[in-house]
Image (cartoon, rainbow, N blue to C red):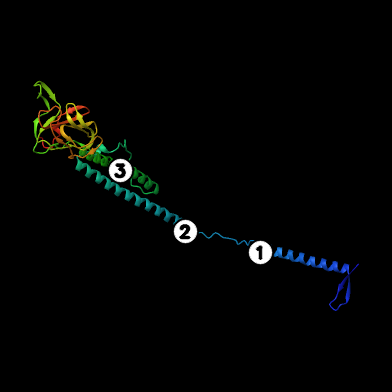
Amino acid sequence: MQLIVLRPDGLCARLPLWAMGLAASALVLLMAVAVVMAYLAGQSQREVVRIPVTRTLDPVAVEAAEREAAQEGLNHLVERVVALERRLSRVDLRIRSVGDSLGLDVADLAPETGGQGGPLLDGPDSPLEMHERLLALEQLLTRHSATVATVDSEIRLDAVREALLPQHRPVGDEAWISSAFGYREDPFTGNRRFHSGMDFAGRPGSEIRAAGGGVVVFAGRHSNFGNLVEITHGGGLNTRYAHNEEVLVEPGERVEAGEVIATMGRTGRATDTHLHFEVVDAGKALNPYDFLPDRD
């Protein structure tokens, strides 16, 4: 078979078919060779070049560096120990100062540490010994800090108790004591009866003040006490203000020491204008005279 090809000059050329096959095979072979050469070139670029490495570290230099690092660590421990000792000194000074000002025996406030002892040895000269000293100081500082917290708590509690304690005169200076605490002749019957409070006589409508801070637990009418105000000061300690003309507080209201809570009157079982003042501890009547600031 032959392949007829039309030439540009209008003439026809006849090419044998086997010649065309040979040319195509040669072209395919050239392309295959080019692909193989490109692959081999890429693989050669991926080869890892191994460079021999030789050890150049000097044992003497390594040992010197290790000694320097150990000394730096020891110096750091020493600095921490010194800082803790200074903190401990300041805490001890604060404990003693507060204890002296409050008249407290700070030794009683310190937590129990248990028995201690051991042989007398030289000071620490190694990182391990310094670390043990550091731990001991941290434990001691923790115990002393607990003591400081206890002292602070006692101070706060004392301040609260001081504010709540009924220690203020419930009436003005113009009022006077008309009947004391204890047994007396009942003003209505003449019989000997126990008087559970202290009576202050004064002018009608004069101010009645809370003897201490607390919460009003009763404010209203009572069969014997007339218009009554009762304040709780915590810990079972209450104060009562009876025979008032007018009540100026309500149950549940919080009052401060010296705050006006009522006006003086003669309501209830009373012969004339006065305040019946009671101090009660867990239901037991106490002598109000012991709570007055100037011992009227």
Q: Is residue 291 left or right of residue 62?
A: left
The residue nearer to you, when weighing 167 against 225, is 225
Residue under label 1 = 45
Q: Quadrant of the C terminus?
A: top left
Which residue is more in the foreground, 172 or 58?
172
Instruction: Please rate how many residues cluster around mark 1, counting C-alpha atoms within 10 Å: few if below 14, some from 14 to 19, many from 20.
Output: few
Nearer-the-camera pick, 129 or 137: 137
Q: Quadrant of the N terminus?
A: bottom right
- Reading the image, the residue beneath label 2 is 61
The quadrant where residue 154 appears = top left
Residue 241 sits above or below residue 91 on the image:
above
Q: Left or right: where does residue 238 sit relative to residue 204?
A: right
Residue at the location (86% across, 72% down)?
5
Q: Quadrant of residue 15?
A: bottom right
What residue sits 40% from the left and 52% below the top?
73
- Label 3, secondary structure: give it: helix
What is the x, y in percent for residue 102? 20, 41
Identify residue type, mark 1.
Gln
Three-letter amino acid code at disc 3? Ser
Q: Decide: marks 1, 2 in contact (CB < 8 A)?
A: no
Q: N-terminal of the two: label 3 or label 2?
A: 2
Residue 257, x across and y down, in percent: 19, 39
Instruction: Give me the disc on residue 145.
Output: 3
Q: What amino acid type should be assigned to the residue bearing mark 2?
A: Ala
